[in-house]
Amino acid sequence: MFTTLSITRRATLGATFGLAAALLTGSVTTTMAQDAKPVKIGWAAWSDAEFVTKLAAKLIKDELGAEVELVQTDVAPLYQGVSRGDIDLMMMAWLPQTHADYFAKIKDRVETIGTVYDGAKLGWVVPAYIPESAIASIEDLKKPDVQEKLSSTVQGIDPGAGLTRLSQKALKDYSLGGYKLQISSEAGMLTTVDRAMRSEKWFVATSWSPHWMFGKYKLRYIVDPKTSLGEAEHVDIIARKDFKAENPKVAGFLSRMKLPIGDLEAAMFVAQETSYDEAITEYIKNHPDQVKTWVGDES
């Protein structure tokens, strides 16, 4: 009886410990899964930033199996957030000039992952129906009749943008003291442009390439002889310190993710005509080799 009871008791205890171990293992596994933090990507509400950020987010989730959290805010808080580690990365560092001030303050606390696209450009645009004999250069804005037709206004975007800072500099460089830079947002600027284009009203607006507006409207950049608005730039991905070491798959993918600027502008135009989700799905479908190169062997 004693032997039988001991065997039974041992079996019962063994089963109990086995169940406890199983529960413990399951609990640890669940906890570890819950502790896997999503990749936090910051972006500002600019059309090019929205497309590349949401494209990267979809591929990181679908191809690499990592969760992604998108954080939208203004550009200055983005740089601060990445430098403090509150945000893992951002895909819209316009360098070497447009975001020079922001980058200089945090460059020692971040790491560069890669370049999303080259040949980015800032400038001021006018509609093609304005004769070049009237406005070919920023210098031409000084003409009294031109200034009157433009209502002494340059249509701008958000206050924190590098383009806004450089446009304010351009007003000084070209002695355009009679002009006002209308600070608004990208959406506000585009509403003004759309309304003016419909009535063929004269305007000058701050803009950049890549942008879908060049696919919808007939616009041209005016010459900036003093290069106050900078020259061709590259748009980089910057991340918090140690991101590469902690997220090698995602960092490897991002280091290879590079879009031809023409492809990007075409995709951005599709996004405006449909939605960003549809445009991203279409882009992935139409560029399988490119996506395969980005994902590499680490997926």
Image (tube, rainbow, N blue to C red):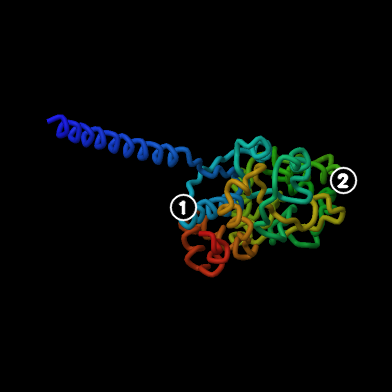
Residue at 46%, 52% in the rendered image: 65
Residue underneath mark 2 = 173
In front here: 84 or 120? 84
Is disc 2 in contact with disc 1, using a CB cutoff of under 8 Å? no
What residue sits 19% from the left and 35% below the top?
A: 7
Real-space CA distance between mark 2 and mark 1, rounded to the nearest whole angstrom: 50 Å
Q: Amino acid at mark 2?
A: Asp
In the visual, does 5 lie left or right of 238? left
Judge left or right: residue 25 versus residue 38.
Answer: left
Going by the image, does 182 lie left or right of 250? Answer: right
In the depicted structure, whether residue 91 falls above or below residue 6: below
Q: Which residue is depicted at the point 59% across and 52% down?
A: 248
Task: Residue 225 in the image: state x and y as whole percent.
Answer: 86, 56
Q: Label 2, secondary structure: give it.
A: helix
Within 10 angstroms of label 2, few (less than 14), some, or many (20 or more) residues? Answer: few
Decide which of 47, 102 is in the foreground and name it. Answer: 102
Dividing the picture into quarters, in which one does residue 74 lie? top right
Across and down, in percent, residue 132 comes to 78, 62
- Residue 141 lies, in percent from the top left, at 81, 50
Mark 2 or mark 1: which is in front?
1
Left or right: residue 287 versus residue 107 is left
| Image label count | 2
Please state the horizontal and vertical placement of residue 181, each as a whole percent of the image.
Answer: 74, 41
Q: Earlier in the sequence, mark 2 or mark 1?
A: 1
Residue lying at 56% horizontally and 58% vertically, measured from the top left: 268
Point out the residue furthest to the left here.
1
- Work out which quarter of the rendered image holds the N terminus and state it: top left
Check disc 1 and report the residue beneath it: 65
